[in-house]
Amino acid sequence: MRDEMIPAPDGPQPSRRAALVLGGAAALAAAGLGWATWQKQAASRLSPEAAQALWQAEFEQPDGRPLSLAAFRGKPLVLNFWATWCPPCVKEIPLLAEFYRQQSSNGWQMLGLAIDQPTPVKRFMQELNMPYAVGLAGLNGTELMKILGNDRGGLPFTLVLDAKEGILQRKLGELHAGDLGQWLKKSSA
């Protein structure tokens, strides 16, 4: 029997070192994916500082009664920052009002925090027959928005929380009907 030479496969063969590098890169990629997943989960909850600021906040309602945000804790909440002088805010309010009318019997709560003066807010609420609670947030509302994730301080800004304070949506800009459907989907998941 004669020794036969087995031809080497075409192309360069990976060295042991290259295999270790590739294995290490795969391990780092897996770790990175794990980190990204953890970050996403952490981002889907209010930070302790944001939760404290939110639930300790108190504002006055347009009729002069006090409004404590702690009263909204423990049920799904749509928190909408708006102003009468903001066209996209005005445009989305009928959509929010209809969502509230349909979902309040299912435990959904809604709170509009007006970054505005009392007189135009009162007039606006009467014209639109807003069915949900409204607080006069003023400059304190702007600070609360920033703590809750709206670094720009723009309007409208909406934060949607589930009953366990998980964030279902944070949106800067006008809401659309598809957004509302997503809230319901996410809250039932």
Image (spheres, grey):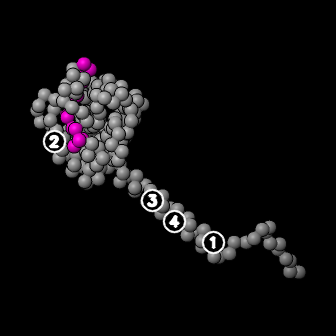
Q: Estimate the spatial distance between the alpha carbons at disc 2 and disc 1, rounded to whole Å.
A: 60 Å
Q: Which residue is mark 4?
A: 28
Which portion, as a residue range, is magenta? 127-141
Does the magenta segment cover residue 135? yes
Total numbered circles: 4
Numbered disc 4: secondary structure: helix
> Element type at marker 3?
helix
Q: Which residue is denoted by mark 2 in the rendering?
A: 58
Q: Residue furthest right?
A: 2
Determine the CA span between mark 2 and mark 3: 39 Å
- Give the number of the mark in front: 2 or 4: 2
Q: Position of residue 68 (x, y in %)?
A: 15, 40
Left or right: 58 with respect to 9? left
Residue 33 relative to residue 127: left or right: right
* Kind of residue sitting beneath label 1: Ala
Neighbourhood count class around disc 4 (C-alpha, 10 Å): few under 14, some 14–19, many 20 upward:
few
> Residue beneath label 1, please?
19
Q: Quadrant of the N terminus?
A: bottom right
Pick the front one: 139 or 133: 139
Crowd around label 2: few <14 · some 14–19 · many ≥20 (10 Å): some
Residue placed at 28% from the left, 49% from the top? Answer: 147
Q: List the residue tagged with mark 3.
A: 34
Q: Amino acid at mark 2?
A: Glu
Determine the residue positioned at 16% across, 29% down: 62
